[in-house]
Image (cartoon, rainbow, N blue to C red):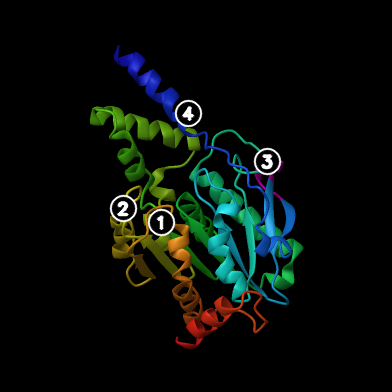
Amino acid sequence: MITLAIVLLLVGLHLGFRAPRVIEQGAPPGFAHAVSETGITTVRGKRLFAWFIPSAAAQTTVVVQHGWGGNIAMMLPLAKPFSCAGFNVLLADARNHGRSDSDGHSSLPKFAEDVSACVDWLKAAHPARAGRIVLVGHSVGAAAALLAASRRADVSAVISISAFAHPSWMMRRALRRWPLPDLVVRLVLRYVEWVIGHRFDAIAPLSTAGRLRCPLLLVHGAADTTVPVSDAHAIAQAHRTRLQLLEVADAAHDSVERIEAHAPALLAFLAQHGIGADDTPSQCGGQGRQADHARHDN
């Protein structure tokens, strides 16, 4: 009976690795004229579906990565303030998401590989727009941005939104719905590490945040019940001299629109570290002026 329960649990875990695929329905009217569809080659020759939003002659590009079960259209509320402020923006569907190719199970390391593929594509296809590269990620996309940046020396800043501190913490929270003995939980965690080919301790934001060679802003909703804000506190406590923390009082885990309202703070963080957008006319009216005001306040 115990063996059967473990088998069923492992089958459930593999099904859990299958992220829901949600296809975007095209860029909204405000962005349709500016979005350029492209394909980016990632690991094993798989293709990522991507949108590139150039901004005149801007030399800094913000790479935005969605979370589990998301797609590029869901991240446009985050992309818009950066585009309006004069940055180039690149968004891509991770493998097994949106319009990108399928490739077995999804995982944090695969997300990170796709983030790195976006950076490599940008530097090869648009070198003049890759003078500085900022990674912005949500949830597992944020953890992936941290992992990718920890392996590279060409990332200028990372903005992590709603990242979990450690994969095992996240999985333990998910497994609480079943009354499993701790031994079984530990075996499940080791099994998942074996499946993805990485130890959790090595890829956890709690660890990768300390290996960055660039500034880091942690953004987290105080009302997040999927990844509690205590995860952000744990990362900040471990690396307090290396990062900044922004708590958004009314934001839940998927409250991307709430984070958008705090765009001036995100832009101010970049400006604080010498990453300002080029002085190009904004296509977004007041948002561009608001972003410019944020830059001058720091």
Q: Earlier in the sequence, mark 2 or mark 3?
A: 3
Which residue does the numbered mark 3 point to in the structure image? 44
Q: Earlier in the sequence, mark 1 or mark 3?
A: 3
Check disc 3 and report its element: helix, strand or loop: helix
Q: Furthest residue to the top?
A: 1
Q: Residue at x 43, y 34 (%)?
A: 192
- Residue 258 vs residue 296, the one in the foreground: 258
The quarter of the picture where residue 60 lies is bottom right
Disc 4 residue crowd, few under 14, some 14–19, many 20+, Cα 10 Å: some
Which residue does the numbered mark 2 point to in the structure image? 228
Contact between labelled residues 3 and 1, with CB atoms less than 8 Å apart: no
- Figure quadrant of the N terminus: top left
Instruction: Count the labels in the image.
Output: 4
Disc 4 from disc 3: Cα separation? 21 Å
Q: Is residue 46 part of the magenta span, yes or no?
A: yes
Which residue does the numbered mark 1 point to in the structure image? 162
- Residue 226 vs residue 158, the one in the foreground: 226
Q: Which residues are magenta?
A: 40-47
Disc 1 residue crowd, few under 14, some 14–19, many 20+, Cα 10 Å: many
- Disc 2 marks a residue whose amino acid type is Pro
Give the percent coordinates (x, y) of residue 92.
63, 53
Q: Earlier in the sequence, mark 4 or mark 2?
A: 4
Q: Residue at x 54, y 61 (%)?
A: 77
- Disc 3 marks a residue whose amino acid type is Arg
